Image (cartoon, helix red, strand yellow):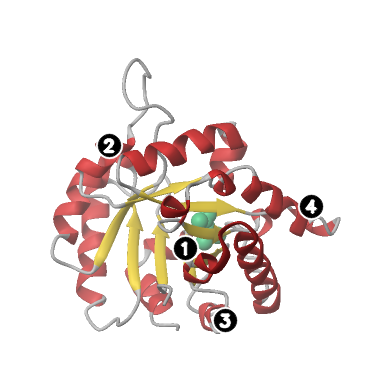
Amino acid sequence: MRKKIVAGNWKMNTSISEGERLSAEIVEKSKDVDGVLLIVAPPFTHLTKVADKLRGSRTALSAQNCAAETSGAYTGEVAASMIAETGAAYCILGHSERREYYGETDETLNKKLRQCFAGNLSPIFCVGEKLAEREGNRHFEVIKTQLQNTVFNLEEEDFGKVIIAYEPVWAIGTGKTATPEQAQEIHAFIRKTLAEKFGAKACETSILYGGSCNPANAKSLFANGDVDGGLIGGASLKSDDFIAIAKSF
Ligand code: PGA
């Protein structure tokens, strides 16, 4: 059975003390959340402090990025092994903001994927089309290429640790959400594409939806057979909203 997952991508938000408070609230309020894996992804500077708050709870910790190299003279970078040392078990990779603002290419992402597995982190790997690609009816082709150039290169054992997040770029932080039909259509397509390479193992892959997901629309999105949860940005910064989303299955 694949896991239901709700992950909060805090992006570059919260002070360290706000992050500690937010994670403590999530731990407290998630006590009656059953059968859903919760993950929070704070900024690097918060990881050890948030790990302290999450210890013994059922909420797991993620980073938002990792270095493409193992160690050495890479000023400003943080290695996957350093992230794992904080207690984090996951790492978001390939978010459209990283692809767009920091020039991350498929080549960089392949290196980062390797670093994650070597460092014992499970990647939450993001794919998604831009508005012009959706309007030009090229979204299937774009997603397929993103997967073929990255995840398809993985060994089957490593692929088993990957969580996919489908995040249409036009829906991120815009208040525009994919309709439940659009989400299901693409999620089923992603699973079918993954199955072409990894066979039945693709049935076990959790595929999350991301892009203006909130307590009002989560239920209709999660009701679809191939939508296994969400990667939540803005709404993950309020514990009540994040927990309400986690209770939307
Ligand atoms: P959003 O962000 O929920 O604020 O649209 C989602 C994401 O970028 O992961």
Reply above or below: 117 against 8.
above
Residue at the image position 26 percent from the left and 50 percent from the top? 88
| Callout 3: SS | loop
Question: Circle 4 is placed at which residue position?
Answer: 133
Q: Earlier in the sequence, mark 1 or mark 4?
A: 4
Instruction: Give, as a three-letter code, the residue at label 4.
Output: Glu
Numbered label attached to residue 232: 1
Mark 4 vs mark 2: give the one in front: 2
Q: Position of residue 98 (x, y in %)?
A: 54, 39
Q: Is mark 1 within 8 Å of ligand 1?
A: yes
Q: CA distance from mark 4 to mark 2?
A: 36 Å
Residue at the image position 55 percent from the left and 48 percent from the top? 151
Q: Position of residue 131 (x, y in %)?
A: 75, 54
Bin the neighbour count of mark 3 within 10 Å (Cα to Cα): few under 14, some 14-19, many 20 and up. Answer: few
Q: CA distance from mark 1 to mark 2?
A: 25 Å
Q: Position of residue 220 (x, y in %)?
A: 57, 83
Q: Earlier in the sequence, mark 3 or mark 2?
A: 2
